[in-house]
């Protein structure tokens, strides 16, 4: 029983290293993600200027003095892009964790309990999945205001259903395996079986889903802020896009570099998420171990 459970949820470090390094997309995504994390953590040290400081040098093109140019108020775009990484990544992490927690609780309960509980929770999940996610977020954000708290709450509410369905399917698959049946025969409580035997084996799917979800959250957050539902008190890439759209023809750099940052971060998260999916998938690990034997 223990051996089966451990084999399912503990990939060897060599397998992880091989999976992450054999793909140039995974390596590139990992490097990009590391750069963005460094920018978010050390924005104050890396930014050459105060991102909120205005000057007379408005709409200056990229140069040695202003690497990414300046916006209409003379603010350094490069410094603002670096500081924007802090907010965008923070929103992605917070929303992914909150919505992931909701989705895991709903999906795990539905998948393990089954019956009427499963039917009720899945109908609730489908209720949130019927309207398109972006437009549902747009409506809720318009009703409750354009604050950072409201934006995080909106995105958290709209992203949990997909996680719930994935976790439900995984829990329903794992609960039929022999080590779970053995735990039931030994008299383990349903809560112990769920949290000690089932959920650790579903963890790889949950981790991969959260990483991939972060990319979608950052993209939707930038879209909502681009159309004016952002918080002007914070420097974000989406709000930079919103402010720069009026100068797009005459000052392309004002909107190009924030858009490039959003695109690269989303691509990096997707590449890392795909690599983690290949690494943590038991079938992929088994194929690699058979080939190496």
Image (spheres, rainbow, N blue to C red):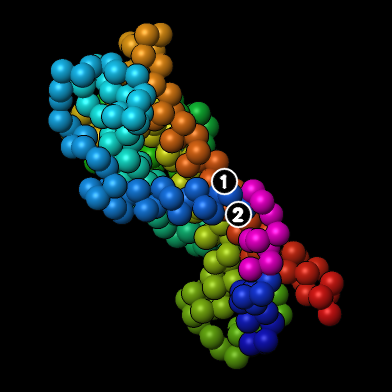
Q: Nearer the viewer, residue 175 or 38?
A: 38
Residue at image coords 70%, 75%: 177
Mark 2 = which residue?
27
Going from the N terminus, do you reach mark 2 or mark 1 first?
A: 2
Q: Position of residue 13 (x, y in %)?
A: 62, 75
The quarter holding residue 27 reads bottom right
Q: Is residue 91 visible?
A: no
- Spot occupied by residue 142 in the image (x, y as percentages of width and height): 29, 24
Instruction: Tell me whether circle 2 and circle 1 mark residues in contact (CB < 8 Å).
Output: no
- Disc sitting over residue 270 in the figure: 1
Residue 87 vs 292, above or below: the answer is above
Label of residue 140 in the image: none
Residue 83 location (% of width, % of height): 28, 41
Q: Residue furthest front?
A: 64
Secondary structure of residue under mark 2: helix
Residue extending farthest bottom: 186
The quadrant in which the C terminus is found is bottom right
Residue 63, quarter of picture: top left
Residue occupying the point 43% across, 24% down: 256
Q: Which residues are magenta?
A: 17-25
Q: Secondary structure at mark 1?
A: helix
């Amino acid at each position: 029983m223990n051996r089966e459970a451990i084999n399912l949820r503990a990939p060897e470090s060599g397998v992880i290293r091989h999976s992450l390094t054999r793909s140039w997309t995974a390596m590139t995504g990992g490097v990009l993600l590391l750069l963005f994390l460094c920018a978010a953590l050390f924005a104050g040290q890396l930014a050459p200027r105060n991102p909120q400081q205005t000057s007379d040098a408005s709409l200056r093109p990229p140069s040695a003095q202003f690497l990414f140019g300046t916006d209409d108020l003379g603010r350094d775009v490069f410094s603002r892009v670096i500081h924007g990484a802090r907010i965008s990544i923070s929103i992605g992490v917070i929303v992914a964790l909150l919505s992931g927690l909701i989705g895991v609780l709903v999906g795990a309960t539905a998948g393990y309990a089954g019956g009427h509980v499963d039917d009720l929770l899945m109908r609730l999940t489908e209720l949130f999945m019927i309207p398109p996610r972006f437009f549902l977020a747009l409506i809720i954000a318009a009703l409750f205001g354009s604050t950072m708290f409201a934006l995080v709450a909106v995105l958290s509410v709209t992203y949990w259903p997909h996680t719930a369905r994935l976790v439900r399917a995984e829990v329903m698959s794992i609960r039929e395996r022999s080590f779970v049946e053995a735990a039931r025969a030994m008299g383990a409580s349903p809560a112990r079986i769920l949290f000690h035997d089932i959920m650790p084996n579903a963890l790889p799917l949950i981790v991969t889903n959260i990483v991939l979800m972060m990319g979608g959250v950052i993209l939707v957050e930038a879209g909502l802020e681009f159309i004016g539902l952002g918080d002007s008190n914070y420097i974000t890439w989406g709000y930079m896009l919103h402010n720069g759209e009026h100068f797009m023809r005459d000052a392309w750099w004002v909107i190009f570099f924030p858009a490039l940052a959003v695109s690269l971060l989303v691509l990096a998260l997707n590449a890392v998420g795909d690599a983690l999916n290949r690494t943590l998938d038991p079938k992929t690990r088994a194929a690699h171990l058979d080939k190496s034997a």
